[in-house]
Image (cartoon, helix red, strand yellow):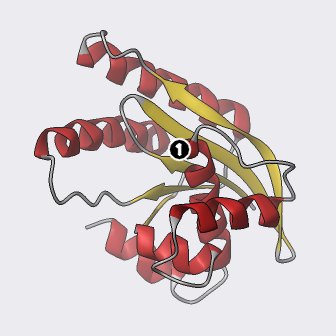
Amino acid sequence: MRILGIDPGYAIVGWGVVDYHNNHFFPVQYGAITTEAGEEFDVRLRRIYLDTCALITAAKPEAMAIERLYFTTNQKTAIDVAQARGVILLAAALQDVPIFEYTPLQVKSSVVGYGKAEKKQVMLMTQRILGLKEVPKPDDTADALAIAICHGHSAGSSLSGLIRKAGAR
């Protein structure tokens, strides 16, 4: 199964493509979509959308795993990230890529085995699982790969259908 993991944002969208076969992960490619702080927000959203469409076309994922948003303080940031996330979801939906959402707790539990793991632990475990020489940069890219790993672990379980249904609400 080819999985596209996405860590949504509007300045940096981390992404990672992994293949998952026989309980093993294989990194395909990874990187980040970036936008400039001085650009108009609609221009930034357009770039995120078009780059995501191009990424999906090139990678041909069988599933997209994306982080479910969770914000407690900065509502302005939450709204802007939600808009960026929306154009990412639209890009996947228009190309008929199934979308699966995971909370940070689910990702940490899946990758490290502990839902309250530190970010550094998740990044190091992602590096180890994928057999990479170093932790991918920027951090958003490493996070996207962790999200893809989370989906790989979840996809074979009976919970995967429930996760998709819960995410569709």
Depth check: give the residue in front, 125 or 158. Answer: 125
Tell me residue 137's x, y (percent): 65, 39
Q: Residue at x 45, y 38 (%)?
A: 94
Compared to 43, does 157 lie above or below? below
Q: Residue at x 54, y 80 (%)?
A: 109
Number of residues whose C-alpha sits closer than 10 Å to that of mark 1, classed few (under 14), some (14–19) or many (20 or more): many
Tell me residue 8's x, y (percent): 42, 44
From the image, which quarter does the C terminus lie in?
bottom left
Q: Residue at x 39, y 28 (%)?
A: 11
Q: Is residue 61 left or right of residue 167?
A: right
Q: Residue at x 36, y 60 (%)?
A: 68
Q: Is residue 96 visible?
A: yes
Compared to 88, does 134 lie above or below? below
Q: Quadrant of residue 164?
A: bottom left
Tell me residue 3's x, y (percent): 67, 55
Residue holding disc 1: 140
Q: Quadrant of residue 147?
A: bottom right
Q: Is residue 13 left or right of residue 158?
A: left
Q: Amino acid at mark 1?
A: Asp
Q: Is residue 93 left or right of residue 126?
A: left
Depth check: give the residue in front, 15 or 4. Answer: 15
Question: Looking at the image, which residue sits at the far bottom?
Answer: 158
